[in-house]
Image: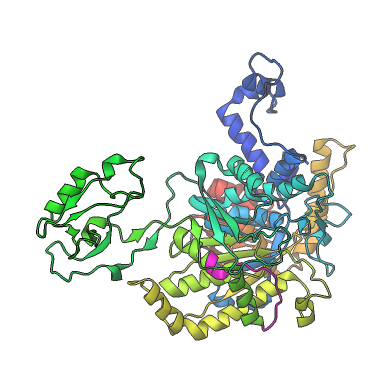
Amino acid sequence: MTKSMQDKMPFTPDLNRERLEQLRALMPDLFTNDGGLDPDELKRLVDPESVAESERFEFRWFGKANAKRNAFTPTMASLEYDPDRSVNPELANGNAIIEGENLEVLKCLLAPYRNRIKCIYIDPPYNTGNDFVYSDTWKEDKNSYWEHIGVTSDGVKVDTNTRSDGRFHSNWLNMMYPRLLMARQLLRDDGVIFISIDDNELHHLRKLCDEVFGAEFFVAQFTWHCRQFTDARSLRHLSTDHEYVLCYARSEDFAFRGNPRDESKFANPDNDPRGPWMSRSMLGLATRDQRPNLHYPITDPESGNVFRPPEATGWRYAKERMQQLIENHAILFPCTPDGRPREKKFRADLGDAFTSFPSIIEDIYTSHGTAEIRDLFDAQVFDFAKPSQLIRVLCEQASSEDDIILDFFAGSGPSGQAVWELNARDGGHRKFILIQLPEALPSESEAYKTGFRRISDITIERIKRVAERLNDDAPKILNEAQNDLPGVKGASPTSYRPGFKVYRLAKSRFPRIEFQPDPEKSEEENLAALEAYIREKEAAFLMTFDREEILQEVLLKNGFMLDVQTEPLADFKENAVFRAWDSQKSATVCLDYDLKEQTVAKLKGMEGIFICLEQALDTTKKWNLRAELGERLVAF
């Protein structure tokens, strides 16, 4: 489909086109006179002497190029609001659960959320040989693209990925690659992504993330001690007790908040003028052979007792530094010669109220996630759910009070619970966006027997039950937070009543998406046919459409977030005109099929953009509005 035709279609942003335009702006010499990229010039840039390609380090797999192309191809899909499954939608404040194929949903979110997500956590399907991978061979043709993405009752098509498949690792990488490319587009410049993974694809995922985010933006490879008890079922008599969480940032300046320092360890029993202090060991970690300068005797100036370090450790400091501490009365000498001297470490010398966040995550187990599910549902409706505490700890380290957290492999929804519980603890207003494929549940599963038919049904129901519980338990959560985090601001314990909206990935409401260009005709002929198609098909549609439904799609594709608000403008009598706004932008919107001259006249001097239907403008109205608004006129 040509650029002229694409401009008339309800596409999400075309990243391939944007990348070419950016390349043309930087290096116009790589393009032909008619604007096309010249492969020969590009080859000369890479290899000026046009010699055979030299060997180089590269991460390649079967299907990589197609997976990348798929990531940057726009979609004509949209999101459809589901009021029946939403909970306290008037209090949603941007919290959303979206049911649908996650790559298409990410593309739908691109216009409003590009560079606006602070933190992404995902728990993608581990490539164990039994889990599914998503099929990305979608086509907008008569084979019914929409059946694949969850619109029909039969759910979605997913493929198994057994080890007997020669492309076992390639299949998994082709699933992950485009989604991570989209994730990078959504992250803020100070954003961060966490990815749960096990040993099966860890090394491949590291290389994949190095390519997508940049090796220099690698932050950490957390080792999560996930198993509480030793696995006695192992055939090799080895209990794998850990998984990983990879962390990459968009900026080298990213830093974790750190853990609050335990202030209870500091006191001042001797009224030292330097303030509260704690005692700590003076022993080091080096043998005499390794660090002979750390092995020497020290003398208590008052008792004359002499103390020597163990041969295996030595002292923490060299002799000169130790002598300074003794002279400054910063060493606590024991009363007997067989005791061990300790250092007085003053709180004032430490400065920062936080200590470093460790790369080994302890005391949070997979069994905690299992217990959460059973506690909420009184049944084991989801296996191997990540504990919400794990995600809460990560979000606490990487996000602030008003940030957006995204999870596009939502599963049972622990990320939503984690965000809400974190808000309840520190008084924040973080928002979550959860995306879950409407994968059909096996009829023999406990979830199916409990009444659920799709995993996304479990996601929505979990967050609904968490909302009810948080409303009841807010005082308890706040008290726990104040014990864990002294000085935490906290939320109002009697008013924490969260809500969320549910959306479904859906076919665009504009009939023009069904138009197929004729390969036998020229670009001009196809463009004329498309314009005629729009005039005929859309004219009838626009006279009967549901304004609220089409308004959501129009605003989303024009960059408004899911928490967009609208209000009618009473000054406009001849047409229904709305003001739309979110935290980033605002617009005036009219979706009437016939835009009156009086309305056009009142738009003069208006600030911001004006969104209307292409069919509402005749040549004169379009000319007048374009003369008044310029690029601020958006005709859809």
Q: Is residue 377 above or below residue 58?
A: below
Question: Would residue 141 be found to the left or right of residue 3 on screen?
Answer: right
Rendered image quadrant of residue 408? bottom right
Residue 231 location (% of width, % of height): 66, 66
Viewer-closest of 589 and 570: 589
- Quarter that holds the N terminus: top right
Residue 9 location (% of width, % of height): 73, 50
Rendered image quadrant of residue 129? bottom right
Question: Would residue 84 be found to the left or right of residue 121 on screen?
Answer: right
Question: Would residue 345 be found to the left or right of residue 64 on screen?
Answer: left
Query: Residues in magenta?
Result: 378-390
- Quarter that holds the C terminus: bottom right
Residue 278 location (% of width, % of height): 25, 64
Residue 311 location (% of width, % of height): 33, 49
Is 438 covered by the magenta stretch?
A: no
> Secondary structure of the magenta portion, mostly?
loop
Q: Residue furthest left?
A: 302
